[in-house]
Image: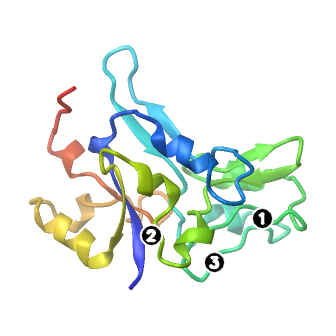
């Protein structure tokens, strides 16, 4: 049964355990491929995780003249292949979410690859396996639909994977708490 990374933005407590776990994923060379954004640090402690949404038709891959960015059969958009990447950085410019980063020393783009060494076997990505606040979850489509039914919002206001920026994504991000004015209690 196919699972997806599901993000409940309003749950993020800013602990950054997802970042620490990311560096421990196989093949990451202890490099963090996700980020935690401080939304408005001068006003409150609201944070949100930022990671690749693994677009179904990714701008990063479309813009790569060397075809160095591959899409795994699971839908994960992988980092640039070392043997193909020419270091043009088109992918970093093309991504509407600002996710791919460029390593000048290695002349290579890197980003979240959804811990493909784990997720291809149904094991949750490292970030979701350690998140203490359930901001990051590894769920089936049915589990995501159950969460959706708990909120009185239509599909257009449920997830980011609608045709607003890059179209459909393999990572689902919920918006109900934000749209309904949910406030964090810390």
- Rendered position, 165 above or below 65: above
Q: Which residue is mark 1?
A: 64
Work out whether residue 92 or residue 4 is closer to the camera in this orientation and state it.
Answer: 4
Residue displayed at 89% across by 41% down: 105
* Whole-percent x, y for residue 174 in the image: 29, 56
Residue displayed at 69% across by 45% down: 31
Q: Residue 132, located in which quarter of the rendered image?
A: top left
Rounded to the nearest angstrom, the CA distance separating label 1 from label 2 is: 20 Å
Residue displayed at 33% across by 29% down: 46
Work out whether residue 157 or residue 41 is closer to the camera in this orientation and state it.
Answer: 41
Secondary structure beneath dot 1 equals loop
Q: Are marks 1 and 3 in contact (CB under 8 Å)?
A: no
Q: Residues within 10 Å of mark 3 (few under 14, many from 20)?
A: few
Q: Which residue is mark 2?
A: 168
* Whole-percent x, y for residue 161 in the image: 39, 64
Earlier in the chain: of badge 1 and badge 3, it is 1
Q: Residues within 10 Å of mark 2 (few under 14, many from 20)?
A: some
Q: In screen coordinates, is 172 left or right of 107?
A: left
Rounded to the nearest angstrom, the CA distance separating label 2 from label 3 is: 16 Å
Q: Residue 146, located in which quarter of the rendered image?
A: bottom left
Work out which quarter of the rendered image holds the N terminus and state it: bottom left
Work out whether residue 93 or residue 80 is closer to the camera in this orientation and state it.
Answer: 80
Q: Which residue is mark 3?
A: 72
């Amino acid at each position: 049964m196919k699972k997806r990374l599901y993000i409940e933005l309003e749950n993020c407590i800013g602990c950054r355990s997802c970042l620490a776990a990311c560096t421990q994923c196989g093949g990451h060379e202890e490099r963090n491929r996700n980020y935690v954004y401080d939304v408005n640090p001068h006003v409150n402690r609201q944070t949100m995780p930022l990671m690749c949404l693994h677009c179904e038709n990714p701008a990063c891959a479309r813009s790569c003249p060397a075809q160095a960015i591959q899409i795994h059969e699971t839908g994960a958009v992988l980092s640039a292949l070392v043997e193909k990447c020419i270091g043009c950085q088109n992918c970093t410019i093309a991504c509407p979410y600002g996710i791919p980063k460029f390593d000048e020393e290695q002349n290579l783009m890197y980003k979240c690859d959804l811990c493909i060494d784990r997720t291809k076997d149904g094991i949750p990505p490292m970030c979701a396996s350690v998140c203490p606040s359930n901001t990051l979850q590894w769920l089936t489509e049915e589990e995501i639909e159950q969460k959706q039914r708990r909120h009185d919002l239509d599909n257009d206001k449920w997830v980011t994977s609608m045709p607003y920026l890059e179209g459909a994504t393999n990572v689902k991000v919920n918006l109900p708490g934000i749209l309904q004015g949910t406030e964090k209690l810390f």
